[in-house]
Amino acid sequence: MADSGGEESGEESSGVEDMPLPPKRAAGPVHRSSVSAEAFGAWNQRALFTPPVWPKPDEQVHHLMDTLRRSFLFQSLEDADLQVVAMAMRGPIPLEPGYRIIQEGQSGDHLYIVQDGVLDCAKVIDGAERVVKTCGQGDLFGELALLYNCPRAASVVSRTESTVWELDRETFTNIVMIAVQRKRTTYNDLLRRVPIFANITEGEMVNIIDVLKLEVFPYAHEIVRQGEEGQHFFVVIEGEVVAHKWTDGSAEPISMVHKAGDYFGELALLRNAPRAATVVAASHQVKALVMDRPTFKRLMGSQIQQAFNAGLQRYA
């Protein structure tokens, strides 16, 4: 049984960003071409991108891939692309306590993954720098400047001796962003066919798609259980699930089938109540897009509430 819906850490961006790093310790990477931000078409083809390769043990590659999978930014990537990204990450880079790896307001060309240690993310508020978040093992930071091509939103300073991995902008743009755009196009087409998403603006849809995580459930897997606390909202995109609701005095449950395009799990989040039904995968494989409670409240609460008020209710 799982109402996991994936890790929640990747759904709230760190909002923190980079400064020059300590001297490089590894041998130089494989040659890589520069990347242009121009528009590309038949008359102006993008040169073939060759990502850098920083040799590392297979165990470290797999560990980095597992860490990347927990961030929404990398969930659109196939394993082959994740491996390319992992190989392109420079490190491990040691940081002494007090080292300022990112400075708020500066431009940034890298994002980072924390291998170990503790780093404080700080913003200038009312003229004073205040810590707004702490990053630890497995956390990713520095992505916003790359994702939105904007200045660093906060500073990051190592509180303890720490070790990080660094990914360059060119690899991010050519590997990760292409996959993000592909995800946005695919999921936009799917979600526009779901009634509750039909009237959402393009900007709102992009925000929603970027935080959705794809989960795959095998046949008979119990996705949510009646009576338990609900932490996630689900949209079925492939396969079928069956919701069973047991009531007092009834020997048999009330059942409802949810197919591709249907959603469930919203009532527990709207009402802050236990799950109203048990939902089980009824196909060989069920694929669902998953959103955690805080993100659901922030991005989808009003839309779901309108549907709920209109009588479009679900069991779970």
Image (tube, rainbow, N blue to C red):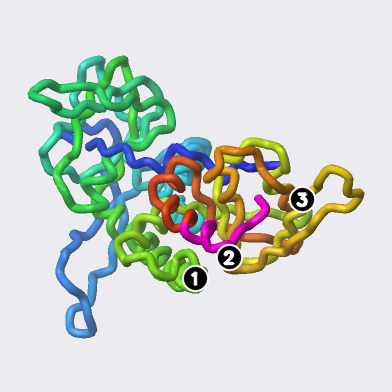
Quick one: label 1, few (<14), some, or many (20+) residues within 10 Å? some
Query: How far separated are the C-alphas under marks 2 and 1?
Result: 7 Å
Q: For the residues carrying marks 2 and 3, which lies nearer the camera in this image? A: 3
Residue in the image at 30% along x and 62% along y: 203
Looking at the image, the residue that sits furthest to the bottom is: 42
For marks 3 and 1, give the one nearer the viewer: 3
Residue at the spot 66% in from the left edge and 43% down from the top edge: 275
Residue 183 percent across, percent down from the top left? 42, 64
Disc 2 residue type (three-letter): Ile
Q: Position of residue 202 (x, y in %)?
A: 32, 66
Q: Are dots 2 and 1 in contact, CB under 8 Å?
A: yes
> Percent x, y for residue 221?
74, 50
Residue 309: in magenta span: yes
Q: CA distance from mark 2 to mark 3?
A: 22 Å
Q: Name the residue carrying label 1.
A: 190
Mark 2 crowdedness (10 Å alpha carbons): few <14, some 14-19, many ≥20: some
Q: Which residues are magenta?
A: 306-316
Q: Is residue 21 visible?
A: no
129 vs 253, left or right, is left
Q: For the stretch drawn in magenta, what is the main secondary structure?
A: loop
Q: Quadrant of residue 289?
A: bottom right
Residue 237 numbered tag: 2
